[in-house]
Structure formats: structure tokens, C-alpha cells
Image: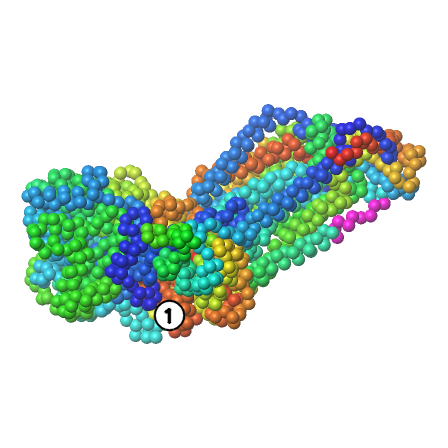
Amino acid sequence: MSKSREKVVGVVGLYDDPSSLLRAAEGVRDAGFTRWDCHTPFPVHGLDRAMGLKSSPLPTLALTAGLIGVLAAFVLTGGLNALHYPIRIAGKPMLSWQAFVPIYFEMFVLFSALTIMGSLFVFCGLGRWHSPLHDSGVMSEITGARFAIVLGADDRMYSQADAKTLLEATGCRDIRPLVQFEEEDDAII
Amino acid sequence: MTQDNVARVHSHETMHRLKSAALPSHGENLTSPDEMTRRDAIRILMGASSALALGLSGCERKPKREIVSRVAGPEYQMPGKALYYSSTWMEGPYPYGLIIKTVDGRPIKIEGNPDHPINRGTTSAAMQASVLSLYDPDRLRGPSGGGSPIGWEAVDQRVSEALRGASSAVLLTRANLGPTERELVRKFLSVAPHTRHFVHEVVHDGPRRAALGKIYGAVGEFLPRFDRARVILSLDSDFLGTDGAVLENIRLFTEGRRVNDAEHRRADISRLYVAEGAMTVTGSNADHRIRLRPSAMRRLASSLVRAIEGDAAELNALGAESGVSPALLTALVDDLRRNRGGALVVAGPHLPEADHAAVAILNDILRAPGNTLEWNTVLPSLKVDDPAEVEAVFERGVDVAIMLDTNPVYDWPGKDFASLLSRARLTVGHGQYLDETLAACSLALPSNHNLESWNDAEPRAGVMSICQPVIAPLFNTRQPAESLLTWTKALAAEGDAIRSFEDWHDYLRSRWGEGSATAAGGGENETKQRWEDALRAGGLFQAVREAPFPELNRAAAEDMARAELRSGGLDVVFLPHHAVYDGRFANNGWLQELPDPISKVVWDNAASVSLQTAQRLKAVEGDRVEIKVGDRSVVLPILVQPGMADGVVALTLGHGRTAGGKILGEAAGANVSRLLGQTAQIAPRLVTEVQLTRTGESQSLVRTQTEFSMHDRPIVLDGTLAEYREDAGFVQGKRHIPEPVTMFPPYDYSKGHKWGMAIDLSSCVGCNACVTACQAENNIPIVGREQCAVGREMHWIRIDRYLTGDAENPTVHQQPMLCQHCDNAPCESVCPVNATTHSPEGLNEMVYNRCVGTRYCSNNCPYKVRRFNFLRYQEAQLRDPVQELVFNPQVTVRGVGVMEKCTFCVQRINEGKYHAKDKGKAVEDGAIQTACQQACPAQAITFGDVNDPNSRIARMNASKRAFFVLEEYNVKPNVAYLARVRNLNPALAGDKKESHHG
Amino acid sequence: MFSKKFERRIYIAVVVLIFSAALGVSFGAFILWPERRELGYEPVQPIQFSHKLHAGTLQVNCLYCHSGAVSGAHALVPPISTCMNCHAEVQPKDNEGRIRPGMAKLLEHWNNAEPIRWNKVNDLADFVYFEHSRHIAAGLTCQQCHGPVETMDHVRREHGQKMNWCLGCHKQPPTNNLKTADPTLTTRAPINCSTCHR
Amino acid sequence: MSVDTSSLAAPSLFVGDVTLRKLDDDIYRPLESFPTIRWWLAIAITGTLAAIFVLCAAYTVVRGIGVWGNNVPVAWAFDIVNFVFWIGIGHAGTLISAILFLFRQRWRTGIARFAEAMTVFAVICALQFPLLHTGRPWLAMFWLVPYPNGQGIYPNFRSPLEWDVFAVSTYGLVSAMFWFTGLLPDLATARDRAVHPFRKLVYGILSLGWKGSNRAWSHYEKAYLLFAGLSTPLVLSVHSIVSFDFAVSVIPGWHTTIFPPYFVAGAVFSGFAMVATLIIIMRKMFRLQHLVTDNHLELMNKIIIATSLMVGYAYAIELFIAWYGGVSYERYAFLNRALGPFAWAYWIMVTCNVLVPQLLWFKKVRRTVLLMYPIVLLVNVGMWFERFVIIVTSLHRDFLPSSWGDYKPTLIDFGLLVGSFGVFLTLMLLFCRFLPTIAATELKVILSESQSQGGGHE
């Protein structure tokens, strides 16, 4: 890894238990921050509301994808068995949809599940390995046992001193700068 | 074969030219160099990798193949097109007419000659299997002397020199020599004066023939007319299995049993009583069966005579002693008495002379002669010589011993023939295989196969049948008659007429020329024309006046019948094997794997005994017992056979071969003929003094069917004649068919063709001909004994056999079972890859190249008629340049991992349709025959277009006797079975426990 | 460790992987696509026989040589005797009066009664039971399946002749143009399996 | 399931003093320490068995299915028995991870990860058999899939085997995704705990950059719930469809409407038995008794006895309907099961699946490893025999007595059966070595809740 400069991109406040984090999150939310997040080792109940997050669109997506799957299954089975090459099988009609129902169902599940998995990449930022949390050395605390609020420097409310004060006000005793290594050699390879 | 194809039968003369043009005469280059590569002609399905859709099999193009042009082929022989030749089957005990289908110069299928008056187009299993023997790689490929190959000239020189100097020589032949062969033998004997000719067969009707000769004072034999008889009594005669002209017997018998629904109230069919010791095909077709030891047959015959004449005391005594129901015997006597002139009694060929005398008297008082018996003066085979006489000649000293197409070292009923042979200076064996005899000979000469041979046969007056070759000899072989002619020519004096014959073909032809010239006159051209006509027709078949029946010398007969009865603790009867006969077909896999019609045992022989006899021996099925007759013994497993008479051991000949091929090496079993020829026998194949001891070992018998009870299921339905007269649709009352419920509207099959089959169980006798015919037509593999043992036999059609009623003397139900081509086929819906589908003509089609082998279809088949290629069964055969020639090019050879099953011979259906289309006509009823149908001697199978209201199949399906197996499952099968009508004696109706179903 | 650069490297790796997989699959499919793989096969034959000359210029009917096509499954290559019907008389010579090499080779085969081993151009799998006669009877021309052979000096495979291709015609709606179309069929020709497989 | 979780589950799922840190230490210890000699020994044995599987499979492909004991009429035997057995094993994983999740059964967290892994590996084992059992697997692997091809012919979607293709592949895929989704946060923990850069790299890549962000958790939890919601009907459908292989056929003994629920119950039964069998060893091997407690075992045992009663009911009702239905073929098929040549298999099945599990009514048995272990082992045996009974005894004697046959397995059959256990156990051992066997993140939720509620430890 090449030599790099550190650049402060925000501030991290670490908490030891979920309840203090919840309280803190409400404070940050009420302060009007938008470019901020909480990082926790496990999902904390009530944090969504505390952060003022909207509910996930995943269920709608999953249902839509599932229905598309059923349609695809209908086209696949009927198209191939009844239209493309109609072969008499066991005295059943070419479009014996009753016999295709298991496939409709499985295709519903398959399409839906694949969509959920794909959506996770989009919504949860999977596949984005880089994070200033690594550079700041707080990631292992977060995935271990501590709870963090991260206020981003790109928030229009942000100023380092205010942010720190805000976190202190929520009872945070471990406040660290969020840094990011600026790589000198920014070449790709 | 269509009518048209029969007309296209070609004679050998043109064939001769064809051969010189297209067929090299010997060896590997047999396939005609024609338009196709051999692979192309044979149609194989190996990995099917080249069909892989995205072509994942590899980057290169498909393996490059060549088309080999002909130089100048005969116009009529189109590559890939079948030609048909007529010939005669000379391999078995009785000659039958053949039509041989050849493709590209290779015979691939045998059918019966429809014009032949005896078999009328039908075939037996052994005839069907003959084509496999032709391409048997174990056949001898050239003459050898003392183990090293020599040339034919050297052979001829050695033999003729030895014969010239011989003070005593023996010529040993089989019995069914043709008339021209017999004449040649006479000629040979005349030029080789110290030579004696003996005839050797283990299975023969010597006692019957001798008895008839003595009591009728004339040479001749009975020709039973089963079709004319109202009451038939068989005394240990398996006339539907192995005795006499079986194909004709089956035909006549079933003709006499045919019923017509339209006149069901007046239906009248023959009634068959069988008294027998073993359980035979004939016995399994009996209306009433009497379990009786063979040694008691004469007493039965004699006491029947007396009872018919009024004194039933002895009959009753016999009944009481042997446990036969008195009511049955009384009913039999009444039936016979009432049907004088319409009754017929036949006796087994293995019974002693005296028995035949007694039966002759019985027939005589029943007025059978002239009514149900005809007299045939032209015997199909030679008289078999007494083995003791031959042994005596050998013991006096023999210089030269010549054995033509016979295997005495294996089956000589007497002393050790190999040691007798070792006394001769020169021993010459002529045969197709290096069998036990040829191996013991100083000269081992290879014989032609029947399909490579010229011959003729005259089984009865007015029937002259010609055997012509349909292929040049595959190997460096020669016909025994050719050899005999060569040696005769060498021995004959200068100027002898025999020396003018070029070869055996010339000899045979000139003899026919003489015969027809004297009969019809005419010049050389007409003689030639008549010869060619005869070749085309398969022979000369003339209606001749029935020979007058000679007068029975009743006093002599009674004298003879009074001969002392000898009887021991157990009767041992030696029966020919249903398929390999006396062992001559032992190297034929199709026959070895053909299930015994009664016990369903394959690849083996056994000692069959009744349940009670087994208990007496304290033996169970599979226990190996030592069977000791005199000072010789064999060890065989016990087979407990319901229906056997107590105190009888039935042994089948033909197993225990030790030399002559790989197939017979696969087979188990023991050679029982070595027990014969001792003092304990009362007839050549009937022994009464025997000791059976358990060896303590046991062995499993391989059977293709193990469960013989019908479990009260309505599978095979039958009824009595009385029931039938009452109601032709009696089957409907024997089971319950609920109204089928279905989610789906049925397909409309009313347009175009709808193929269907009907099997008349009243006709089927269970002879197995269909099984082998199917095997030959459809390239069905043999799998061997081990694979059969684990239930992997491959037959597309099998004959199911069920036993009902009395456990000791059961009623037998036969049912040919094959793919039922169900309209709602359960196999189709479960195949994940659409490999088995339905055609708009109602066929359940199996596409081998699409099959991935899930075997789900087999599981879901209620009839279990699907067969799976568990291993690479055909690959060795495909790789062998000779064996692969047997394959039918119209049917794919299946590779490993592929399901297969009956296709209703779809290749024949397609051909029939093309043929009709080319002529611009509709497919004629009967023009398309399945292989099983064509072979069936009983004509029990009908195939055709159900949509054609005038077709035979439509009539059969409309019969009130018709039922479908497992109809209640709404699979809508397309194979109708017509219930068997049994003609039970009304007097015994209560006596006989009939199973009723439903 | 999990820097932006690391992330980019992974992205690049994934993109490269996906791209090369896609490229590989499409290239493989392109190479192996049965139609393509069979197409254009044009082997060198033992004798330089020109269909262009015989069938094109000289207008010899296809069935004169391939007589089996009318009556049976196989169209047949002609026996040498068929060639000799004409070539016994007509023996093309070059400028110096020598018999041309192809002709000489034919004569050599004829005189030695030695078959000619042609390379098969149109070759179906062994489990396909194709009947030429049915197609001729239905009024199809040779060219519909074999391409314009009369324009080819060397015969070339013009169609992949895979099952899909066969079905392409068979599955068409019934037509009156075909002489022997079965009135009971709902398609132009039967599409059930045993038509070709058995 | 009417277990009162509020009173029972929450407080007793941990033994001793457990903190979030210690939890991680315990769970990740096997990943971060050199494997013990016992682990090496175990994998040597299972690896050998897996090699036997590979050899037997290769031999089968080369020679043909004939090297097995299958025949006509018994065209399916060990092959499909093993297939159904393994699919059934897999079902417990999905049940624990999905259905118990939907029912908010907290105790599932201790065993869910392990059971899900078992699902994935069991499906891998199961998938070998349908492919291997075909006569021509080199074609079956393509032709069962509807892909564009030059033949112009496609699968028959009416066939239960084709349904299987869709069901089992969907099931395998969804199970794997569900499992992986659950693993994500734990992988991130593994990444952040890793010292060695290579470990960090591998776990880092696998965790896909998980940062524990609550914006992600919000979607993640919804996705997990949806996966659970999809998996629940999926798992029911999969074994129903597997049972359709038999139920939609015409064979007496197979053609039974009770099969789908009966198969699902049987699958859960056998799956829980297998989870118990393995997790008892696992927790001992990796010293996790305080996380997979006797309470967990007891709850599993309760499910085992419940499902045992269900399959027992199914056995009884099958017999009853065979008698009551009055179809002679069916009546015979069931009599033949109980009294025919394969009666021994039937009675092994009944003994192991219905009689022996009744001992679990005793609390002492449920909570004593030494007492319950033989029982769960026998349940595994019994459930294998259940499939054997259904498949082999129904096939060997169906409609026409003439076609009745016998069945004898060969050494290759046994090789594949034993070998499939080798494959399965090898995968399990690798899993235990490289991935967190207990869903640490989920456990943390429960732990933190129990701590915040002031609930102490036992």
C-alpha cells in the first residue's frame, strides 16, 4: 500500500450500549443532519425510527419480481410445451397448466429471492469495500461490541466542532475523527 | 411382410450372380460395398454425444464418414432395401418353410413361408433364432486336422484314402436328412462298401414308429388332425411344445378352439384332456389335466379301452392308485365314447412301444383313423438306430468314423462315445462348432449354416421343400452333403454318373430336374423355369390324396400292449429343452435366454418334481440332488413344479454342454443324456429306476417370473364354454370397472390411423415364438444369466403365466404382456425430457436418443413392460465384425443408460404406410404385421387400424370377450385381450375349482 | 487495506471476469453452434467430380445418379457403372490428348472393379431415419435441403440439418403445395417422434 | 408450536457469564486457532469417505447403472432413497432459520447457522443422486434444463422430475443466499478480528464491505424477513414436490394424497435429528456448550417427538386408508410392506421413527445427551429406511404379479450411501473450521436484549 495522507471526513462517536445510541441518534436526527449514519454490531430495535428512516421498498420489489417469475414460468412452460413443439403426453392437453403449477410457484420464489439478493447490493452498499471507518480504526469496534454514530463532513450542517459538541451532548465519551487515507498514487493498479 | 414383398422373393440363381458381383465369398468383407458405411446401416445409439444440442461434444466436426460406391450392383438390389428369399429350416427336428429377409446381402430376419402347407407362414422360437447362429463368432472358420488348420483338398484326400483302405467305416448322421441327402448317403454307401450308416438322435419317436410299423404292417405315422377333433386326449404327448410338427399342431389345435361371438350360443370347441407326468405346454393348455406317471400311461390307455367297451373296473383301480378323481375318469370315458369319430388320442414319443400299441387300439375303437387321424407314409426323418448296435460296431473295430452335423460325444445315450471314437483310426467330425465331438475328432470340418446351405426336405407326401442359401458362406465352411458328395466322387469308379456333378447344388438341382421332368415332361428350359418357380415358392407343394389308413392288427397290438410293465420308485423322463432342444442350439443366446414356458427358468436346466415328491425327498427348490441311474449320475437343482405328477422327475436335455462356444459356457445346467442307454430305461427316454440324493448344496435357479399366483386380481380373465354360451360378454361380470373420472378431455383419435392390438387368449398356447421374433426384429440384447438373475432381462414381450386353483394341479393362464400403448400413458407424463411421447396414431413412442435414463417411466408403468439398458449390453456385439451383421438396420441399437420397450414394430408401420402411399392407396388391413403377430403359430395376435371398421382388429376389439388389463386405472390401453374360453366337461363343472375374480 | 484502490481492483477483476466469461460463452457458442459447425463442410473428394458441370452445365437430372432418392431411404451415390454409361464414350482429354486425371482415376477404379470411397458431406446421426423418398414424393426439390448443388464445383454442406431445422418445415401449417400431405395432419408433415426415430 | 418463549427461551439460552466480547471470542475461536488433532482426524476419515463417493460415482458413470442393484421393477432404489433422505435432512435447516424465525422462536439463533449450513450441504449431497441415477448423466445435465438448442425439443414440464429440477435448484439457491445473507455481518466481524492480512483479505472480500450501517441493517432485516417468508413455503413445496415423484404416479403405495404433508413432517423430523446428531458433537468439539445449551437440545427434542407423532400418524393413516379405500392393489402394497420380504425394513422404520422417540416424553431423556443421542441416531436410520420402504417395497410388487421382483443392493450402492455422508461431513467440518458456526450477530441481539431487560444469567 502506498504512502498516504490522512484527511478528516467526519466524526465518529462510539457508545457502549444500544440505548445510549438510540438516544444519541434521536438527537442527531433532531439536529437536522442528513449525511450521517449509525453503525452497530447487530440491528438495534427502534433505531430506524430514531434515525427517521423510511421503510424499505424491498417487499414490493420482491412481490413484483415474483409475479414476473410466474409470468416467465407461464411463458416458458406453455410456450415450449404447447406452442413451440406440441407433443401429446399421457392424454393431457398441450397447455395442461395444472401440471405446471409447481413450476410457477418455484419461479416465483426464485425470481423474488434473486431480486432480494440483488437489492441488497444496491440498498446495503454491498460490494463497496472501502470505508473511512477502516482507516479510522473503528470498524473492529463496531463489528465487535460497540455502537457508533458517524457524522459526515459533507453534511451541510457539519462543522467539526459542532458535530463534536452534538455528540458530547448525547453523552458520548469516545469521539474520534473520521479519517480517510488520501492515496498519493491514485492510479488504478 | 406385405403381400407384395412375397411376390418379390428372389431365387438363388439371380442371387448367385449377385454374389459374384457384390459379395466376396468369404470372410470379413462380407458386407456389400455399397452406398453406406456399415455403421450407417446398423443404426447405433451410443453416447448420442453428437446430438448434443450446443454441440458440446467437441470442437471438430463429426467424425468423417465415407460412402463407398458400388462398382456395378445388380439393379434390383438397392442398398438398404430388403429382399426376401424362400428356403427351408433344416436345423430342427421338423422342416418348415422360411422366408428370409436380407438387407444388403445379409439375412437379418426369418419368417415362415405363408405358402408352406405345414407351418403356413408361422415360425418357432428356434427358427427365429437361427439368424443369430449364422453370425455366431464361435463358429468354426476353417477345417483343421489334429488342431492345426488344413485345406479342404488335404481333408478330402485324407478321408477318401482312409475310406478306400478301410475295412470298416461308420457314417453317423442326424435323422432329418432330406430326400436328396438320403440318396447321396445310399450312393456313398455303394461306393464305400465297408461303410455302415447309422442315425443318431437322442430325441426321436422311435418307439412310436416301431409300434405303428408292427401293428399296422406298414411304414408310416399318424398325422393328428386336431382341428377335426372334438375331444383330444394326450398321453404325455407335448404336441404343442416339442412333439411332431408343432407349428402345424398349434395351428390346427387353435382352429378347433376358435369361437365366434355371433354364434356364441352354438359355440362348440374341442376339449383337451392331458394325462402327463411333467408339466408341459400342452398340459398347461388342457381343459382337464390328469397327473399321471409316464409309466402308467399304458395302463390308462388299456383301461380306457376296456372302460369304453364297458368295463371300468381297471380304470377305477388305476384312478384309486394314482389319486386321479374317479369323476374325472368317468367323465373322460363318457366324453370319448360319445365322440367316437371325433375323438383323438396322442401319445408321447418317449413312451415305450407297448404304450403306442395301446393308444392305437384306443384310437381304433374311437374311430379316429380316417377321421381325426391321417396316415402319412412319407416320414420326415430317418429311423434312429439302436445305440447298442452302433457301440457293438465300434467295439468290433472301426477304421474311419464320419459324423455329420451330430454331436454324439455330448449326447450319446450309452457308453462314453469319446472312448469309442478313440478306437477308430480316422475320425471325421463335421459341424458348425468345435463341439464335444469335433474336439475329439482327428479332422474337424466346419459346416455351413442352414442359411448358407442347399438342401431339400419332404416331411410328408406332396410337400417338397427347398432350402437355398441366402448368403455366401461367411467362413471357410462346407456343407456336410458337399463333403459327402466330394468323397463319393473320389471313391466312385471312373465314369460313374456321380462324377459328372459339379457340386452339391448341381446334384440337388439335377435330382429335382429329373423329378419334375418325369412328372411334367418338357424341355430343359421348362425344367429350369420349374426349378426357379419352386425356388421362389420355397418348394413344390401339391395337394395329394390322403393315403388310405392301413388296417390295425388288433391282436398284434393287444399282444404288444400286454408286455410286462416295469415300474420303479420314480419315473425319470428326459424331455427336449423347449428352446435349445437337444443341445444343438445351446450356443444361441436368444434361445438360452428364452424363459421356459412353464417354469420361466433361463440359462439352466433342473430336475422338476412335484411339491409332494420334493417333500418326500426332503428337498426344497434349488437344492442340488444327485440323480443316479445305473452307475452314472448327474447333479441338478430341484425345481418344484406345480402340476407335475408325484413320483416323476422331469429332466431337460440340451444343457451341460462343455465345448463349442462362449454362450453355452455362460449357461448353467448339466448334461442328463449321459444317464440314458442303461438297463433301467423302459423306453429310450424313460427311466424307472433311479436314486435321488441331496448333495447338501444348493443353487439358485434364474427365473424371469417368480410369482405365479394372480392374487385374485382381474388380470387374465377366462370362462367356461358354458358361461360363454350363456353370455358372450361373461368377462364383464368378472371384474368391476368404475366410471373413469378425468380432468382432461380425451384426444380425438378417430381420424387417420389408430393402431391397436388384440390377443386372443383362447388361441395363445404360450409357445414363446413371439418373444424371439420380437428379439430378432428389434435388436433386443441378451444380458446373460447373471443379469437375468437380478431381473434385467430385456424382452419387449413376455408371456406371463399364472396358476390358479389346486396347488398341485393348477389351472394355467398364459398372457403375452407387452407395451399396451396406453392413450393416457402413465410413462409419458413422468418423463422429464419428452423421450416417450404419444403419436397421433395412438402409438406410445420411445425415443432412445432423447432418453437420459431416469427410469421413472418404468416405475410408473403398471405393466412393467419397459426395459432398461443397465449395462453396455450390445457393445461387444457391435464391435464384432461378424456379430454386428445380425442387427436390423431399421431399428436403433440401444446403448447404455437408455430405456426401451415395444414399439408395435413402428418400423414396419412406417414402411407399410410409405408403401401404401406410393401406391396411392389406403393401408390395407393385414399389410402391416408386427413381428410377434407374424411369428405366432396360433395366430393369436391381431394388429391393425382400429379406425378401419372392416379390419380384423376392429372385429376383435368388438368381441364381447375383449377386455383390457388394468382398465380401471383409465390408462386406456390399446392391447385388447380376448378372454380364454375353457371347454370344461359339464359333468366336472363342480369338480373343477375355477377362480373367479372381482 | 480496504482502500478505494482495492475496491477498484476488485471491480476491474469482476468486470474482466464477467466480460471474458461472456466472450468465452459467445465465442464457444459461435464456434460450436451446430448449424454453423456443420455448415460449409466441403471435403476434398477422391475424384474431382464437378456437380456444377454435370448437374449445372450438362443438366443431368439429379435422380439419374442418385436414383435411390425416389424409392428409398438412401439417395445413393451411383455405382461406377452409372458413370460409365456416358464415360465409356465421353472421356475428356487435356490439350495434349491425355485423359484428364480425374477421368483416369475413374477408369482405374472401373477397370480394377474397386469401389470409390467418397467423403460424406451431408451426414445425419445414426439414430435418424431419414427417408429421401417421402420428401421427393411430397414434391420437395433436392436444392431445398442440399442447396444449389448444380452451382458447386465441390459439394458443400448448405444446411446444418439439425432436428430444429427439420422441424422448421415439418411444423409449418398444412399446405396444398405438397402432393401427399396427409389430410389428418395439423402440420405440414408429421412431427411425432417415430417419424424419424425408432 | 406452542412453546412459551417469553418465559422459557430468553433467559436460559446462555450458560454462565456471557458478554458481547466473550461471545465473539468463543464463536470465532475455531476460525482463529490452528485446528485440533481431533479435527484433522475427523476430516481424514470423512475425506476418505468422500473419496469413496467420487470413485463409486465415476465407476457408475463409466459402467452404467447396472453396477447398482436396481432392476425392473425396482428401477429406483438407493439412488432415490439417498436423494430424498438428503433433501429431507436439509429441511430442518430451513425450518429453523425461516419458520422458527417467523414464529419469533429466539432459541433458534443458537443452532440456525449450523442448521442452515447443513441445509446447503445436504442439498449438495442430494443433488448428486438425481444426476447420477440417470442412465446418461452427461446428457441429463443438459436436457433437463430448458436452454436454447439445435434439437428444437425442450423438457416436459409435466414431469415431477422436471418439477424437482426447478424445486431443488431453487431451494439450493435460495438456501445458499439466505445462509450467506445471514453470514454477512459475521463475516464482517471475522474480517475485523482477523490479524493475518490474508485472512483479513478473504473475509473482507466475502463480507462484501459490510459496515454495520443502520441504513443497511434496515434493508437487511427486511430482506432477511422476506427470505424467511419465501423459504417457508419453499421448503414446504420442495418436499411436497419430492413427494409428488411418488404421489402423482400410479403405483400402489406411491399414489397417496397424504404424501406431501407426510414427507414434510418426515423431513423436519429427520432434519432435526441430524442437527442434533451433529451439533452435539460440534459444541463439544469447539467447546460451545454455553451457547448451544441443553435447553436448545430439549427444544429440538420436543420438535422431534412432535414430528415423530406426525409420521407415526401418517404410517397409521396409510394403513387405514389402504384398508378403508378397498383398492385391492393398494391393500396388498401396504400389507406387503408390513409383512412381505422387506418387512424388516418396515419394522426398523416403525421402531426407529415412532417407538423409540417416545422415550423423549421423559424430561430426563430430553436433557441428557447420553440418553438422547442414541435416539436421534436411530431416527436418522429410521428415516432412511422410511424412504427405502416407500420406494423399494412399493416398486418390487405392483400390479401384475408376473413382474414382481426382488432387490439386492451392491457394494457400489453402499459405497455411494456411505460416501455421501463423507461428502456431507467433510463440508460440515470445513464449515466449522472456516465460518462462524453460530450466528454471532443474532445472538448479540438476544444477549443485549436480555441484558438491557436486566435479565441476568442462570
- Tell me the subunit letter for badge 1: B
Residue at 15% x, 60% y: name it.
B511
Is D254 drawn above or below residue B523 in the view shown? above
The magenta stretch spans residue A56: yes
Image quadrant occupied by the N terminus of chain B: bottom left
Residue sitting at x 51%, y 70%: C177
Say which of B824 and B492 sits in front: B492
- Give SS at disc 1: loop
Q: Which residue is mark 1?
A: B925
**Crowding at mark 1 (Cα within 10 Å: few <14, some 14-19, many 20+):** some
Q: Is residue B687 visible?
A: no
Q: Is residue D108 magenta?
A: no
Where's residue B382, x and y in %? 14, 55
Magenta region? A52-60
Describe residue C192's horizontal placement relative to residue B400 as left or right: right
Residue A72 seen in the figure: yes
Residue C59, image x and y in percent?
46, 64
Given the image, on which type of amino acid does mark 1 rest? Asp
